[in-house]
Amino acid sequence: MSAARYAVGIDLGTTHCVMAAIDLRASDGDEVVDSIEPIPQLIAPGLVEERLVLPSFLYLPHPDELRPEDRTLPWGKPLPFVVGELARSMGGRTPIRLAASAKSWLCHPGVDRRAAILPVDAPDEVQRVSPLQASMRYLEHLRASWDHRHPDAPLPEQEVVLTVPASFDPAARELTAEAAATVGLGHLVLLEEPQAALYHWILAARGEWRKQVRVGDIILVIDVGGGTADFSLIAVTEREGALELVRVAVGDHILLGGDNMDLALAHAVRAKLAETGTRLDFWQVQALTHGCRHAKETLLGDTALDTAPVVVPSRGSRLIGGTLRTELTRAEVAHILVEGFFPAVAVSAHPTSRARAALTKIGLPYAQDPAVTRHLAAFLTRQIGATRDLAGFEKHTPDRAGFLHPTAVLFNGGVFKAPSLLHRTLDILNDWLNTEGAPPARLLEGIDLDLAVARGAAYYGHVRCGRGVRIRGGTAKAYYVGVESAMPAVPGMEPPIEALCIAPFGMEEGTQAELPPQEVGLVVGEPVWFRFFSSSVRRTDQVGTVLDQWQPDEIEELEEIAATLPAEDRQPGEVVPVRLHATVTEVGTLRLEAVPRVGAESWKIEFDVREP
Amino acid sequence: MYDSEPGFFTRLTLALRTFGRILTENDFASAVLRLERGESRPLAVVELPKPPLRETSPDSALQLLALLQQDGRFVDFLEENVATYSDAEIGGAARVVHEGCHKVIHAYLQLEPVRAEAEGARLTLPAGFDAAAVRLTGNVVGQPPFTGTLMHRGWRVAGITLPKIAEGHDVRVLAPAEVEL
């Protein structure tokens, strides 16, 4: 760690990746020398350019599609796949060969994330990749790019911080860390994206931040990126006279972002064109989505305009004759975006969900309710007790309150580049606060909405070397395994299940939980499955706590986990009593082990395993 | 030039062709005479004067044109016959061209006006001004300093960064033909 020249922050995003660096030798405390690391990438066949962002797209070309010399990168021999801007543009024309949103797939509990499933619609002859492999390709490109630009300071030797959504489950975190380790970045640290955004705010304020928040503040971070919406609550406390930040709650994983908004506008415009008898093909819909994004930015940025033109260029060389022209009106944007994604709802509103069709095609579990404000309302209502046990906050939320009252808000993500959407969200939040007689929340400003996460992550790398304020908080969930309760069997009824707490809320990196007093039996030589649960609200459960009943929104069931005891010197079929032991690694992943009553050995319990 | 000795038939046809030219062309006949007398001389190496004009490399010009076509459909637009379309139709296409080309120009070139003053402003050019960056028009007489009205601010490129080209990349293909399977 001491050999590191740079702290490097990597934002491995759903739609694009960003890499930022801080020169540790030139930085001290609040005086930080930071930069965004340009990423060379193919932008057209045979053309390489340095860009600030690497689009998170992987294109798997046909062997005859691109000549090797047109796939050459500055650091070596041509690869059989394309990553970045060229991948995105080629995928726009040939979607069956494009792997996209790998990050959302990485957190999709319904699929095997190590299995080659992407692109989902690829024909059989395309060599598909797994969500894990796709993530590796992006990290590989970032590493090669860094090493090419810094031959004297290779990336594995730097203080690397990789960001993940706060809502990522233990399996997705472990897969992310595994992808990084595979490309030689085994020593990195994971950081939650909303925290990274707050770190960037601290960095951008250059020491002034201490004047903008005070002890007793609760900062709500609303991060709506290209593909996901992520919420976190961070409390400002005091220790030994210095301000301290504690992350007290994170939201659920919501697949809802700016891309959904552009797509919604494109669908509306497409319907408008269809009324006049114009049908669009796939390529044109892509161009239309692009045109709508541009028109949206124009309308949301300039309040004097009432309409913005949307143009879909022709595919052929006859540009004028074949180009479709329509327009997007302010009223349409207000209706579709503002009312659709940011409706003024009461804080008691809950996201609507509809039953999914039984035979759904394999796909991402997109949020069924597009209303960001309803998801936010549900989050704040659910986390009403988030600060109840925090010293100094006992009286923060009045007894009559219906939700947790934030006192400051930090927005992040490209969606909020539109000031009207930012203020709309803030106004709705302040309405909720006003209804309960609480003062309005302050807006924390000054962050770079597109690049904040990477820059904040790099700053965290700097802070980890002991130079600046750290956000504490540990794991944002408590974890439980399901054990069958010891009850006489009743024919036709499943034995009721109890949840045994094995990892309490708030475990810090590099710490271990105690061993629970309860033992479970593992059968030697065959995998034993456990139901696995988490809770983002039960803050006081300790290791060994057994729940025999709980509220439906209190505990969430995750994918099953499995342990296999090697037969070695035991009889296959023998049952060995073990205790389940939780550790949070230095990297920031949860590790579960089965520890037998005697002997020094233990066995790792795997997340993301498939039943045969 | 023949690398090897010419064969019989080659020599025969050569003899027949030179026969005719010796009879009809004065210069040719005297050159053959000199050769026949053994006065063959090596080609004189003439020191050419350095040309005052130089060729520019077409690579970056073609590369920029390809980028303008890729993002702004520039070549498509110029190569289309605009006479048959209404202004509204041309306007729709012009938005594509404007948006894309604007993005390209600003992504790769750092453009800045030559003069910071507003157009229409009066300004004075001192002696020794850069005649390449400021062009005088109208009543051009007398000695500097010159005072006049700024008609056009001019444009200058302060920096240019074009994408790097892979070895073997054919810059003459501005836009590949697209074939959908």
Image (cartoon, rainbow, N blue to C red):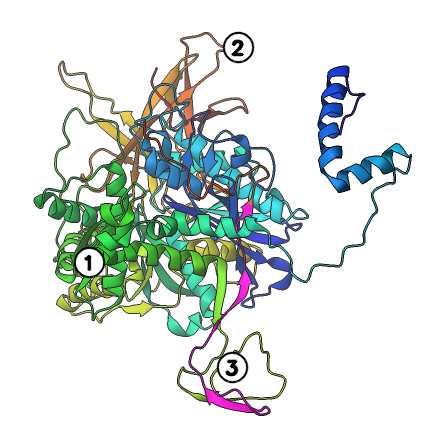
Foreground: A74 or A37?
A74
Identify the residue at image location x=12%, y=37%.
A354
Foreground: A546 or A532?
A532
Amino acid tagged 3: Leu
Query: For the residues marked 3 and 2, what is the alpha-carbon distance in whole angstroms?
Result: 97 Å
Query: For the residues marked 1 and 3, what is the alpha-carbon distance in whole angstroms?
Result: 38 Å
Relative to residue A163, is residue A442 depicted above or below? below
Foreground: A263 or A270?
A270
Residue receiving disc 3: B136
Image quadrant for the N terminus of chain B? top right
Residue B48 lies left or right of residue A111; in this view the side is right
Q: Mark 3 or mark 1, which is nearer the start of the sequence?
A: 1
Residue B88, label in figure:
1
Q: Does the magenta-highlighted stretch encompass residue B145?
A: yes
Measured as percent of width and height from the top left, residue B5 is found at 81, 21
Q: Nearer the viewer, mark 1 or mark 2?
A: 1
Specify whether disc 1 shares its chain with disc 3: yes
Q: Quadrant of residue A359?
A: top left
Measured as percent of width and height from the top left, residue A594 is found at 44, 26
Q: Are marks 1 and 3 in contact (CB under 8 Å)?
A: no
Residue receiving disc 2: A569
Relative to residue A445, is residue A295 depicted above or below? above
Identify the residue at image location x=22%, y=26%.
A361
The answer to whether residue A388 is visible is: no
Amino acid tagged 1: Ala
Name the chain letter of the residue that bears numbered label 3: B
Specify whether disc 1 shares its chain with disc 2: no
Amino acid tagged 2: Asp
Residue A153 lies left or right of residue A311; in this view the side is right
